[in-house]
Amino acid sequence: MRFLLLCLTALGSFGALFFIAKLAGHKQIAQLDFFDYITGISIGSIAAEMATELEEPWKPLTAMVIYGGVTLLLSIVTNKFPRSRKYISGTPTILMDHGKLYYENLKKAKLDLSEFMVMCRQQGYFDLTNIQTAVFEYNGKLTILPVSSQRPATPKDMNLAPEQELLFTELIMDGRILEDNLKRMGLDLTWLNKQLEQRHIHSPKEVFLALCDRNLKFVLYEKGGSKS
């Protein structure tokens, strides 16, 4: 009986954690700021406690709901009142601009020079003279604007006008035709089979992945590893 209760509380803890994470949104994973980091750790710890709490599992569950609710509330507040973001999430800090390093801003960001150099190297900047501006974002990431002579050349620089690339849609994945995607693209099985025949593919099961964009550019990867 006790083992069954343990399984039920563990499943309940997982379900509550999953629900709160979905409610909080992908920001919890993609862009952790200081507050997200704290709440993420706290909710995870409470969920682990709930998983083994057999006597009064409602207590850690209540704490999880409160933490999740506060996180959601602050997200709503920052969206409704953008000016509040600097008090809750913080503001970006300029660490370097026009070849000048700002010691006070580095100190404010709790970074020393060695850490700053590491973050620059991680983005491919081994020579600080190639950096026009370096900004330490509120989520702990460093954003770098290179000097104009060091940035990659663009088609506009060379007076070129390449055709706009479009998003690709999956039509076949691991041998299975995605009929909903096919219909969404305004295509049918006859068109798809014709594309396969042109590439000497006898069955969709031979296809690992097939993609198509709005210009009907068709790309196919066979299970053997070849591309056509």
Image (cartoon, helix red, strand yellow):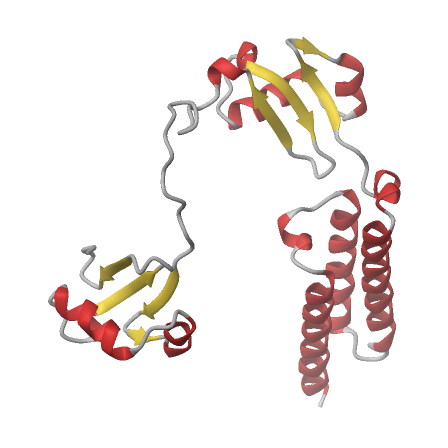
In-image side of 201 versus 130 (left or right): left
Q: Nearer the viewer, residue 63 or 33?
A: 33
Quadrant of the rendered structure where residue 21 is? bottom right
Tell me the quarter of the image containing the C terminus.
bottom left
Tell me the quarter of the image containing the N terminus.
bottom right
At x 65%, y 57%, the residue is 26
Q: Nearer the viewer, residue 98 or 61?
A: 98
In the image, farthest residue toward the bottom: 1
At x 38%, y 25%, the residue is 159
Q: Nearer the viewer, residue 11 or 49?
A: 11
- Compared with 72, 155 (above or below) is above
Q: Where is residue 42? Give x, y as percent.
A: 79, 56
At x 85%, y 77%, the residue is 58
In the image, farthest residue toward the left: 200
Quadrant of the rendered structure where residue 218 is? bottom left
At x 84%, y 64%, the residue is 69
In-image side of 144 versus 105 (left or right): left
Quadrant of the rendered structure where residue 83 is? top right
- Compared with 72, 194 (above or below) is below
Q: Where is residue 140? Give x, y as percent.
A: 69, 35
In-image side of 191 versus 21 (left or right): left
In-image side of 62 versus 52 (left or right): right
